[in-house]
Amino acid sequence: MMPSQTPIAAALAAALCLAACSAPGGPGARLPTLDGQPPLVVAHRGASGYLPEETLEAYARAIELGADYIEMDLVSTRDGVLITRHDPNLAISTDVASRPEFAARKKTIQVDGETQTGWFSNDFTLAEIQRLGAISTDAERPQQFNGQYKVPTFQQVIDLAKAKSGEKGRTIGIYPETKNPTYFRDLGLPLEDKLIAMLEAAGWNSRGAPVFVQSFEPGSLKYMKGKGLKTKLVQLIDGDGIDLKTGAMTYAVPVDRPYEWTKAGDRRNFDVMVTPAGLAEIRTYADGIGPWKRYIVSTRGTIGADGKPVDVNRDGKINDADAVSTAPTTLVADAHKAGLFVHPFTFRNESRRLASDYKGNPANEYLVFYRLGVDGVFTDFTDTALAARGGWVKEMGR
């Protein structure tokens, strides 16, 4: 086992070597990605499968595991500082609820059309937020680190990536998202100009910079492009869930459409973006797409006589483990035809998140997507994605 590998990564690598014997490909085969290079491994919120997400410690761990890029969501403090949190609602990923000094700031508001109760980043100064501790957002993941790590600023993450790049002798890129940009713009705390200025100051506002800037809102990307952002831009494409009877995507607030569309009275859903016309439109302002992986490979459940999904594994819950994968769509090929790269989200190891035909082995899911030609993957488990990629590249004779 290599020093940087975890036991699960080593086991996956061994399994992939066996799978390669009967898999397609051959010596020197060109990879089916847009540029013919191995797909990128993007550490989604850092090593969030192991440590509280979007902390310096989670990002450092992902880098140690070998991530090509570290991904972060940007929200604003009351004093206009960009910090890395997935949600404006700090109750989701910090210990703010246990801090009596902030009890009075709890409130119920609308965020992108969804009613939420909690504590919100825009009501806290940076100094106040840095008194909070980050917590795990998944009960199945390690809880012993809760409260130990602080919420970093975007600048701290930039500095970390640069420092680690020098230390490791390889380029470690960043993958920031303007999170809820309409929400923050309406509060007088727009994200975009600050993001551009920080990348400019870092020397990273160029086409070749190790930076992808992403957003679910086209308007945010178009604004930044118009203001002189030169990095690669990525249109994210979301959905709410899957109808297990049909495998079709379902839509519900707040992930039915870009919130700027809702505000403008545009009732289309995200699915219009994955049509040829939608992809052509995206190509006018972005370089790639980041779709929920179910747009590429969906799932379908077993439906009982009562018309409801069956709990196949009898664990008392209905989830992906009770479903099977459906045939892939043509989205990857369609996007490549339009000149767009494809970085689907999010790959995870937990058995409840793996369709039954993957046999509890996350490597089997990665292989399906790698073979389809995705150009990168968002993963909570960097080591697993890298082991699967290594096996697949070997299978392709590279």
Image (cartoon, grey):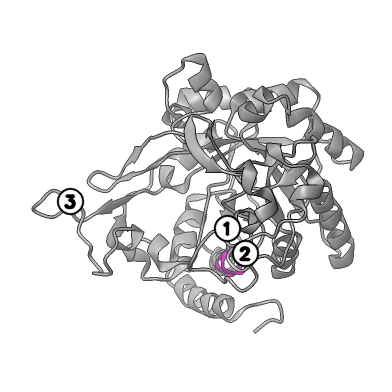
**Quarter placement of the N terminus:** bottom right
Residue 185 locus on image (x, y percent): 68, 25
Q: Is residue 105 above or below residue 350?
A: above
In front here: 132 or 261? 132
Tell me which residue sits at (85%, 59%) in the image: 165
Q: Is residue 258 above or below residue 89?
A: above
Q: Dividing the picture into quarters, in which one does residue 149 lie? A: bottom right
Q: Secondary structure at mark 3?
A: loop
- The amino acid on which the numbered mark 1 sits, given as a three-letter code, is Thr
Q: Is residue 30 visible?
A: no
> Is-magenta flag for residue 346?
no
Q: Is residue 135 visible?
A: yes
- The amino acid on which the numbered mark 2 sits, given as a three-letter code, is Thr
- The amino acid on which the numbered mark 3 sits, given as a three-letter code, is Lys
Which is closer to the viewer, label 1 or label 3?
A: 3
Residue 294 locus on image (x, y percent): 41, 46
Q: Please give the residue where the numbered disc 2 appears in the rendered image.
A: 382
Q: Which mark is residue 379?
A: 1
Position of 176 with respect to 375 (left or right) is: right
Distance Cα–Cα, label 1 vs label 3: 31 Å
Q: Please give the residue where the numbered disc 3 appears in the rendered image.
A: 308
Pointer 2 or 3: first along the chain = 3
Q: Is residue 130 above or below residue 21?
A: above
Magenta region: which residues? 381-388
